[in-house]
């Protein structure tokens, strides 16, 4: 691939990424990457002193019929309306998102996030690591777009 063709390809990725809005998947609807899926089953927002805690129950599932399915490079985090990003607080017993799932099976895990009390409208983002998804135009999460799988869950308060 020539330098001009590579530059054009990456320019298209940037334009598509900027022009494509973040897609929000409703609570309880699976978001799938090939045959591996993640679904927010429950979300609970609790006051915890000066901070809030957002606890999300996630269901990981495999639509594959004959092979064990897993995703190595998937991560979740929360972004608020001010675009502040919050990583999950993982306990030792937390089931990793990379767990191998037998065909047509599901695994339930959870993630807990500490948010400042003034964080509003948190969105759970599920994404793959940057490469190679940054370079695949056909990948719906490619480029610099976020894939939101849960805007608010049951019990979450909308703003203040």
Image: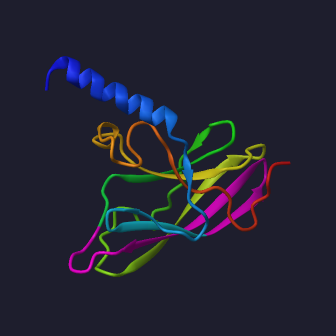
| Residue nearer the viewer, 83 or 29 | 29
Identify the image's colour scheme: rainbow, by chain, secondary structure or one colour: rainbow
Q: Nearer the viewer, residue 35 or 113?
A: 35
User: Is 119 situated above or below 92?
Assistant: above
x then y, percent, for residue 76: 48, 53
Which of the 4 image quarters holds residue 153? bottom right
Number of marks present in the image shown: 0
Tell me what residue is drawn at x 43 percent, y 29 percent. Answer: 15
* Closest to the observer, 40 or 22: 22
Taking the image as shown, residue 58 lies to the left or right of residue 104, namely right
Magenta stretch: helix, strand or loop mostly = strand
Is the residue 86 above or below the residue 16 in the image? Answer: below
**154 left or right, relative to 98:** right
Which residue, as the protein is rendered here, is positioned at the far left? 1
* Image height of 42 relative to 72, above or below: below
Task: Please state if 150 lies on the left or on the right of 50 as rendered.
Answer: left
Which quarter of the rendering shows the N terminus?
Answer: top left
Quadrant of the rendered image containing residue 93: bottom left
Q: Which residue, as the protein is rendered here, is positioned at the far top?
A: 4
Magenta segment: does it hold 50? yes
Residue 132, image x, y percentages = 27, 42
Which residue occupies 61% across, 66% down? 27
Q: Residue at x 35, y 25 (%)?
A: 11
The answer to whether residue 108 is left or right of residue 11 is: right
Q: Which residues are magenta?
A: 42-69
Residue 10 position, x and y percent, is 31, 27
- Residue 119 among those drawn in magenta: no
Identified at 53% across, 47% down, the residue is 87
Q: Quadrant of residue 5?
A: top left
* Residue 136, horizontal then vertical, whole percent: 30, 41
Query: Looking at the image, which is closer to me, 115 or 137?
Result: 137
């Amino acid at each position: 691939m020539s330098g001009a063709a590579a530059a054009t390809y990456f320019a298209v990725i940037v334009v598509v990424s900027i022009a494509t809005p973040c897609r929000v998947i409703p609570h309880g609807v699976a978001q799938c990457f090939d045959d591996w899926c993640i679904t927010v089953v429950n979300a609970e927002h609790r006051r915890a002193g000066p901070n809030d805690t957002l606890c999300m129950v996630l269901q990981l599932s495999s639509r594959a019929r004959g092979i064990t399915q897993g995703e190595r490079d998937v991560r979740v985090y929360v972004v608020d309306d001010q675009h502040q990003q919050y990583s999950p607080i993982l306990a030792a017993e937390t089931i990793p998102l990379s767990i191998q799932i037998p065909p047509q099976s599901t695994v339930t895990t959870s993630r807990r996030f500490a948010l400042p009390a003034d964080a509003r409208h948190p969105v759970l983002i599920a994404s793959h690591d940057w490469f190679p998804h940054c370079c695949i135009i056909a990948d719906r999460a490619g480029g610099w777009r976020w894939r939101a799988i849960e805007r608010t869950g049951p019990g979450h308060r909308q703003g203040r």
